[in-house]
Image: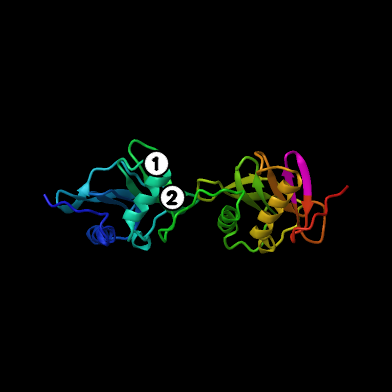
Amino acid sequence: MPVRDFLKPGEATAVINELVEAAGTINAIKVEISIHDASMSIVSGMTAKTWAWRNGKIQVVDSDTQFVGQKIFDPRDFNVSDIAGMFATAARLAKSSAGQQLQIVEYADRTVYMTVTTNPESLTVFFRQDGSLVSQVDLTTLTGIQEAYNDVVGTKKLVNALGILPNQGGMYVDVAAAGTIVRTVRQPRLPVRTTTRRETTTLAPFDPRLVRPAIIATSLNLIVSTAGLSSVPAGWSLEVDSKDNTPEPRMYFTVNGSLTVMTLDGIDVTPH
C-alpha cells in the first residue's frame, strides 16, 4: 500500500484539500494528522461523518466523533505547511515525541486551535490558526506579560479591570455587561478562556491600551529590587482598576505581602 509522509513540506496541506474534495464540504469539526495518517470529521445535517486517508485512498471510516454543537470551521484556513516544525517544537516542550498527532478542534468558547499531543499522553501543546505557538508564558517577564496581554485584551475597547493572578494563575480582564462580569483569562500554558458570573461592579470602564506591559514589567522589577529580593516571589499579584475613584486606573501590586500602588506611568503613589 502507498505510504505518505505528512511531515514532508506540502503533504499535510495537500491531504486536507483532498479530504475536503472527497467530503464535498468545508464544514469540519475535527482534523487529525499524524506522520502517516490523516482524517477529517465533517457535519452533514446534524450528523458527523469521518473521511480518512487509509490503505492508499481517501474513504469514509468508522469514528467515535459526534456532532454536539462544537464549532464548525474550514480546515483550509489553518496553516499546516510546517507540521514537522510544529512537531519538533511540541516535542521539545512536552519532552516527548511518542505517537505525535496534530488535531484541529474547538478548544473552548467557540475558538478552534491546533494542538499536538503524544501517545502516551504528555503535555498538550497549542498552536494558533497561523501555525504560531501559544507560548508557555512567564508572567514575571516582559515577553510573557506582553503575549498574555495581547491574548486577553484582543479587540476589547473597554474593560473594568485587568490583572495578574497569584502564583502564575494567569492574566485576566473583566468586562461588565447586563448584570454579569465576563472574565477572560490567559493561563501560562493554555490559550485564553472566558467565564461569566452574575455580578455587578462599580468599577469604571477604561481603555485597556492605557496599560502598558513594559511599565508593568519594570514596575514589578523595581518593587522587587526595592524590597531587597533576588527574584519575584511566589504569590505576587497585580490589579489594575479605578477602585479608589481616581481619574484613571491605578496599578495595585501585592509583592511579598506588601501593597504598592502605582500610576499607569509607573510612579509610586502608595499611601503612607
**In what element is the residue under mark 2?**
strand
Picture coordinates of residue 209 (x, y %)? 66, 63
Picture coordinates of residue 85 (x, y %)? 35, 55
Picture coordinates of residue 20 (x, y %)? 27, 60
Q: Which mark is residue 48?
A: none
In the rendered image, residue 255 lying in the magenta stretch gets the answer yes
Q: Which mark is residue 95?
A: 1
In the rendered image, residue 248 lying in the magenta stretch gets the answer no
Horizontal placement of 141 versus 16: left or right? right
Query: Above or below — where is 121 with respect to 212?
Result: above
The amino acid at mark 1 is Lys
Farthest right residue in view: 272
Residue wearing tag 2: 126
**In what element is the residue under mark 1?**
loop
Q: Residue at x 58, y 63 (%)?
A: 155
Query: Above or below — where is 268 with respect to 233?
Result: below
Precedes in sequence: disc 2 or disc 1: 1
Q: Of circles 2 and 1, which is in front?
A: 1
Mark 2, Cα crowd under 10 Å, few <14 / some 14-19 / many 20+, is: many
Label 2, label 1: how far apart the Cα atoms are: 15 Å
Q: Can residue 44 be seen by looking at this rendering?
A: no
Q: Residue at x 13, y 52 (%)?
A: 2
Picture coordinates of residue 111 (x, y %)? 47, 54
Look at the image and give the residue range highlighted in magenta: 252-260
